[in-house]
């Protein structure tokens, strides 16, 4: 594989997905710290932070969605590779394109539904129960993360068609 | 109803097709769950399923124990704490053939005593143990197999998410079920250790023997491992003593490891950042699988395949042990492609009245079903624990892991047979404690 | 037309036979079999109570059993009913249904089919008996909602929020000293195993349940079918409330009869202490709601009038 000829691994896309992953890492640190602080407050000051779990939950959504493009671009996803050798070069190419095409379509449906939730959540002021944190920005992160994954899929399809062979060949 | 079942069977076929054609497993489940629901229940329903499950899986509080424990493990590795722990383990049991694999299984069992989840157990121990076993020359299949199988102990040794859900479904006592899981958990741990012993006796190259260091060196190794041992004791002890919940234990553990790493200048800010990036990458990969499973499961409920299976079993007119055998086969089949907790929720309401009506003890049945679910977690093609191990052992082909877990799968089958033959292994503790 | 009813309760829960089955029959009868309902219990269509409201709004299932408390921001007015003393266990369901028109604003996203109030949240404690306001000071108690948290705080205890599924372990290990939850939790969540004392008698928060329907799916029905759903839903409301209260009674009776467990009925003096302490919470919540432009006082007065 030649990285310089690859759209999906281009420098700009790499920077974008890495920048989001860095924000994802921040969400993870917040998740860890707030859990720790919650325990300390409960014991040292007998003053539990009401709603720590809400912050943890929203950080969890952010962490996953912001890291998904990075995981996709760096090919972290688990595949069954048992029959890779048996399906041949064109089988591998066909499979790689099919997965991105069909998977990309399902993700487009997901994004449109996430967008609708975002709009609704904004209109109706959806918020968490204890802390009343607004939910719409987190639906926004789902839209953002999944859109970038779709873009990566699209560019990978173009790459695969131009190369005429799978990334592993 | 027949057509629903047919759609279900075709969809499962389609899922295998996508997986063979190299589709990431999470995405394949997502695709099949979406299109299957579209066919059975319409586009509105299918689209709603995608967003509902994406949000509910990623915002699930209990699941956050996973990224936090992964982080704790990754930080321990980056700072060199896990290496020290395994150097100590090796100093003490490394002179045995397969000693590190045995130490890992024991580590899984110990961790299982604080974690209700197989995934968390496999990730935490695997993250620490796999690189070290590789360093000491263990074969990939033995080391990954032992971790993937050992991780399932998290589900059997209390506390266990599996028992809690079973208890809620069947109105049985969680306390009794927890007590009932202890002896079978120890039995299974013993069987796993025997499996390792047999493997390394037959193929000594899989888990090479080290030399026995003198006692001064062994003590030094133990002292060097003390920091991480202390964190484990604090997290585990903290849960037992009621200082915090498992999620909190994971968070506190991660903060402690990070604090010790920075205080000892064992990690730079840059390395800390890289560890975080590595952690979120792994977490995103695991969550895609969980989202896929969460989208697939409602679809399987819509196909009525589990209930159809149950009804045909009822109609077959077999004796109790015949019915039990069929249930076992059905679970082994469903376990190939279904997520463990989902299997519990869908099948227990069918299987429980059927088998307890035939005279089987409800607590005993809970343990049997939990072991069957554990087996499903390491049965190809969809074996959550195998995927988890793959996530921390990226260079090992998934087939090697499935091959590696096979002997342990047999050990679980033997455990099942023993529990059927001697139900008192299950019932001794709960009956003596609760009368 | 077959409607899917998403239910997070286990397939073995008394509600399946005694409530959903009756409702499904009722709907089929009132529509001459044109509309049927299939229940997917045990969270088969998606686990847990938290996301059920969204599952119906999005349209995954046509119907779902849910708790408005999990999406509190959508139901600021309805949830005033969970404040201590606003409704009673026995009359709450009727009082709310009589004034349901006042809640139109809150049901723009989902069609309300049935509403019923739960048994009051009781004080479950693992080790420490609570017989007076003095006893509760400093206890860490799990609360189901923000309002319940304010109530517990007014009593001098410390509210802790956590998912219902974590209560059992947390009470057993001592992460929390107890929980505010309704009486069915003794057996539904097995809390009797980790609870030594249940304290009853003070004005407490009362949670709400509802059965809601996707707006588009409701619009797809004919006018007669819609009316049939609403009529069946009204009957369902009272049936479900009665079932819930009888389950509470069953749970508490079982608990009280168990060796080593005690059901504490507060003395009138102790009740007065508790209620005096929590009274300002109600006033503050009303003021807060009024400041957001919600006619809280009017709603609460209307509820009181229909008692
Ligand atoms: Na466990
Ligand atoms: Na499996």
Image (tube, coloured by chain):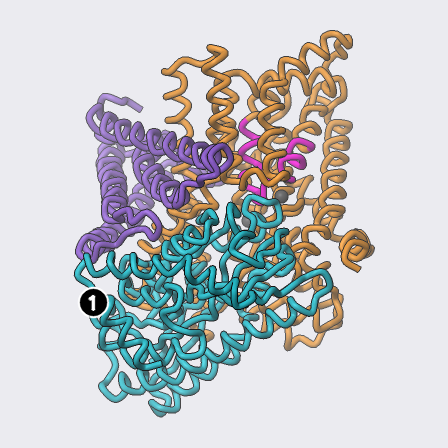
Chain colours: A purple, B orange, C cyan
Q: Position of residue B369 (x, y in %)?
A: 65, 57
Residue B141 vs residue B276: left or right?
Answer: right
From what the image shows, is residue B283 above or below residue C297? above
Which residue sits at x=54%, y=37%? B399
Residue with the mark numbered 1: C295
Q: Main secondary structure of the magenta part?
A: helix
- Is label 1 in a helix, a strand or a loop? loop
The foreground one among B177 and A107 is B177
Q: Where is residue B170 in the image (x, y as percent from the top left)?
A: 61, 65
* Segment colored magenta: B106-127
The foreground one among B244 and B177 is B244
Total marks shown come to 1
The picture quadrant for ligand 1 comes to: top right
Residue extending furthest front? C269
Residue B36 appears in the figure: no
Does B401 appear in magenta?
A: no
């Amino acid at each position: 594989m030649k990285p310089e000829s690859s759209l999906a691994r281009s420098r700009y896309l790499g920077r974008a997905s890495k920048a989001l992953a860095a924000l994802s890492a921040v969400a993870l640190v917040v998740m860890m710290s707030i859990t720790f602080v919650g325990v300390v407050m409960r014991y040292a000051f007998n003053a539990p932070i009401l709603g720590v779990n809400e912050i943890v939950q929203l950080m969890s959504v952010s962490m996953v969605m912001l890291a998904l493009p990075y995981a996709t671009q760096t090919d972290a996803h688990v595949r069954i590779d048992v029959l890779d050798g048996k399906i041949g070069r064109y089988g591998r190419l066909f499979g790689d394109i099919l997965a991105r095409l069909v998977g990309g379509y399902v993700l487009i449906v997901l994004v449109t539904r996430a967008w609708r939730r975002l709009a609704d959540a904004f209109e109706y002021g959806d918020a968490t129960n204890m802390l009343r944190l607004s939910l719409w920005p987190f639906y926004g992160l789902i839209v953002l993360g999944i859109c970038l994954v779709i873009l990566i899929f699209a560019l990978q399809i173009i790459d695969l068609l131009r190369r005429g062979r799978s990334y592993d060949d | 109803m027949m057509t629903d079942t047919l759609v279900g069977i075709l969809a499962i076929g389609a899922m295998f097709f996508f997986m063979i054609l190299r589709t990431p497993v999470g995405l394949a489940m997502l695709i099949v769950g979406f299109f299957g629901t579209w066919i059975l229940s319409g586009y509105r329903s299918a689209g709603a399923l995608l967003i509902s499950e994406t949000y509910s899986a990623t915002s699930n509080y209990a699941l956050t124990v996973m990224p936090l424990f992964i982080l704790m493990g990754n930080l321990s590795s980056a700072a060199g704490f896990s290496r020290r722990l395994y150097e100590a383990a090796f100093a003490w049991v490394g002179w045995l053939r397969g000693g590190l694999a045995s130490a890992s299984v024991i580590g899984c069992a110990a961790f299982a005593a604080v974690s209700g989840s197989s995934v968390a157990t496999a990730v935490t121990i695997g993250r620490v143990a796999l690189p070290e076993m590789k360093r000491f020359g263990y074969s990939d299949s033995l080391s990954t197999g032992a971790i993937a199988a050992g991780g399932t102990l998290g589900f059997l040794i209390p506390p266990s998410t599996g028992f809690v859900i079973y208890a809620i479904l069947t109105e049985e006592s969680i306390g009794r079920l927890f007590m009932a899981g202890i002896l079978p958990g120890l039995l299974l741990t013993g069987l796993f250790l025997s499996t390792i012993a047999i493997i390394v006796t037959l193929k000594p190259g899989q888990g090479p023997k080290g030399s026995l260091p003198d006692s001064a060196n062994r003590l030094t190794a133990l002292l060097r491992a003390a920091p991480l041992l202390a964190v484990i004791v604090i997290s585990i002890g903290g849960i037992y003593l009621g200082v915090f919940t498992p999620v909190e234990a994971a968070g506190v553990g991660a903060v402690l490891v990070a604090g010790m790493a920075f205080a000892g200048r064992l990690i730079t800010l840059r390395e800390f950042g890289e560890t975080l990036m590595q952690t979120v990458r792994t977490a995103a990969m695991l969550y895609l699988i969980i989202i896929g499973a969460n989208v697939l499961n409602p679809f399987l409920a819509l196909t009525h395949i589990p209930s159809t299976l149950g009804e045909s079993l009822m109609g077959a007119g077999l004796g109790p042990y015949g019915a039990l055998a069929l249930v076992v086969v059905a679970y082994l089949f469903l376990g190939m492609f279904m997520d463990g907790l989902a299997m519990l929720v869908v099948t227990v309401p069918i299987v429980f009245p059927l088998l307890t009506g035939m005279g089987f003890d409800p607590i005993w049945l809970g343990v049997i079903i939990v072991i069957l679910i554990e087996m499903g977690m390491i049965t190809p093609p969809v074996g959550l624990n195998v995927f988890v191990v793959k996530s921390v052992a990226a260079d090992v082909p998934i087939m090697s892991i499935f091959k590696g877990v096979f002997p342990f799968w047999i050990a679980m089958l033997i455990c099942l047979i023993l529990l059927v033959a001697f139900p008192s292994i299950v019932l001794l503790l709960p009956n003596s404690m609760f009368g | 037309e077959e409607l899917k009813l998403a239910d997070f309760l286990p397939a073995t829960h008394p509600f399946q036979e005694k409530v959903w089955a009756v409702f499904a029959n009722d709907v089929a009868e009132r529509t001459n079999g044109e509309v049927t309902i299939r229940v997917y219990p045990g969270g088969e269509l998606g686990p847990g109570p938290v996301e059920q409201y969204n599952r119906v709004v999005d349209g995954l299932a046509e119907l779902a059993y849910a708790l408005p408390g999990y999406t509190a921001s959508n139901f600021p007015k309805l949830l005033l009913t969970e404040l201590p003393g606003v409704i009673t266990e026995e009359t709450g369901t009727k009082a709310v249904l009589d004034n349901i028109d006042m809640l139109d604003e809150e049901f723009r996203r989902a069609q309300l089919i049935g509403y019923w109030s739960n048994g009051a949240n009781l004080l479950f404690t693992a080790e420490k008996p609570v017989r007076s306001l003095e006893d509760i000071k400093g206890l860490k108690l799990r609360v189901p909602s923000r309002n319940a948290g304010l109530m517990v705080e007014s009593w001098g205890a410390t509210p802790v929020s956590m998912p219902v599924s974590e209560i059992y372990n947390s009470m057993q290990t001592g992460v929390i000293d107890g929980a505010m939850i309704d009486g069915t939790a003794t057996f539904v969540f097995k809390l009797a195993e980790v609870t030594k004392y249940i304290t009853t008698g003070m004005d407490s928060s009362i949670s709400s349940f509802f059965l809601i329907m996707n707006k588009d799916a409701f619009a797809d029905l004919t006018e007669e079918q819609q009316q049939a759903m609403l009529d069946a839903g009204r009957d369902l409301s009272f049936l479900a409330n009665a079932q819930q209260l009888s389950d509470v009674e069953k749970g508490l009776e079982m608990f009280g009869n168990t060796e080593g467990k005690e059901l504490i009925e507060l003395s009138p003096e102790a009740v007065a202490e508790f209620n005096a302490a929590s009274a300002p919470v109600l006033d503050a919540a009303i003021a807060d709601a009024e400041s957001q432009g919600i006619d809280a006082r009017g709603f609460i007065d209307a509820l009181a009038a229909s008692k």
